[in-house]
Amino acid sequence: MKFEVLWRDKRTAARVGVLYTSSGPVITPAFMPVGTEGAVKGIFPEQLWEMGYRLLLSNLYHLYLRPGIDVIEKAGGISKFMGWAGSVLTDSGGFQIFSLSKLVKVEEGGIEFSSHIDGSRHYLTPEDVVEYQHRLKVDIAMVLDHFVSNERPRKEIEDATFRTIRWAERAARKKEEINGETAVFGIVQGGVYRDLRRKSAEEISSMGFDGYAIGGLGVGEKEDEMFSVIEVTNEMLPDDKPRYLMGIGEPYQMVKAISMGVDLFDCVLPTRNGRRGQIFTEHGKINIKRTEYREDFSFPDEELPFKKALLRHLYTSSHINSALYNTLINLKFFLDTMIKIRKYIKDNSFEEFVRMTKKIWRKK
């Protein structure tokens, strides 16, 4: 995999680049729609492609449990299994250690866990995670990391941070052993502690990964703490490799992170919130179930033929098309936002876009 920076904003660390994966080029900054179990909910793969998306996210933990690595391997890999023409990044399952902690036992060798589907017991090592993603023929694989809540004691966060470093060393050796087309990204952890983030970034970036991710944020910490961590981490990461902020999708948070040098994002917000009746527009979020939209015949997106009154009617009627239309609108907004961001960076006026975005999305 190759990453090339094409343009840099003169006043911030924002940049426009191109990520050349084994499935084709991806222009950055880029947002990845989330297809955890092999499909992005509420939209067809060809719709995403026609919109302009070229990179999706899926999840090894879920695919490993169902339908299984063997099934997807026999199908010809994850892209063919999904019916997707673009690139795929798979998360390793580190977030599931956090979110399903009652079912997970973390050891130095790896993680032992009970399936949330049928209770069966499983064991994954850092080496397994790299090998399985290679067998899935993903374009970008994430290493196994140990992520604990930022509310836990510092000693616990420190232990998880250094375990993540040791696991990354093992993943890097497995990557060299396989020597395949799959790119592998290391993950920086460290909670909200700047010294731990510096140490983690220093160690992980010395291992020669194809890209680097900032994990463990967006889980309850204060926003200024998040931005502080992003800033100090980006200062330590190689300039010639892509940087991925995991799980962050609030518009202003993405824009601010891009001003610090982040290139990639993923989040369930546009799809999950769309199913719940929340729509992202250039003027902010709207909750379409509100009575005020009953006779509102304007469009959330002028390029799409869905009036607010129709969207409210479908949502309050529990119509299946409610999720489809809302998801389409939201994912188009996220893509359009990335396109605008690239233009402002090329024009060396990205600071202006940061201010505009903050004004719209920080109305408090």
Image: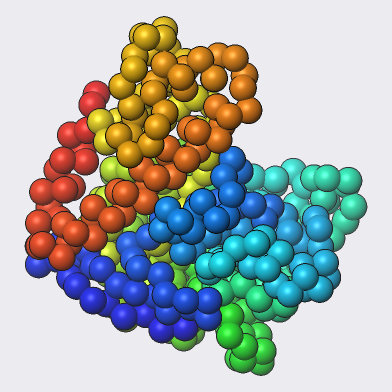
Number of marks drawn: 0
Image quadrant assignment for residue 105: bottom right
Who is closer to the viewer here, 363 or 26?
Answer: 26
> In this picture, is 213 found above or below 1?
above
| Residue 201 appears in the figure | no
**Is 141 on the left-hand or right-hand side of 240?**
right
Residue 361 lies left or right of residue 307; in this view the side is: left
Residue nearer the viewer, 183 or 281:
281
Rendering coords of residue 1 (x, y %): 47, 83
Q: Is residue 117 left or right of residue 252?
A: right
Q: Residue at x 70, y 45 (%)?
A: 100
Give the residue displayed 47% in from the left and 40% down from the top. Answer: 328
Is 18 left or right of 158, judged from the image as shown?
left
Q: Position of residue 107 (x, y in %)?
A: 73, 64
Residue 17 in sight here: yes
Residue 362's spot in the image, x, y percent?
A: 24, 32
195, 313: nearer the viewer:
313
Give the camera-side residue of 188 and 258: 258
Asked which quadrant contains residue 348, the reply is bottom left
- Where is residue 111 shown, x and y percent of the image? 74, 62
Q: From this view, report whether residue 324 is shown above or below residue 13.
A: above
* Quarter in which the C terminus is drawn: top left
Residue at image position (28%, 43%) is: 252
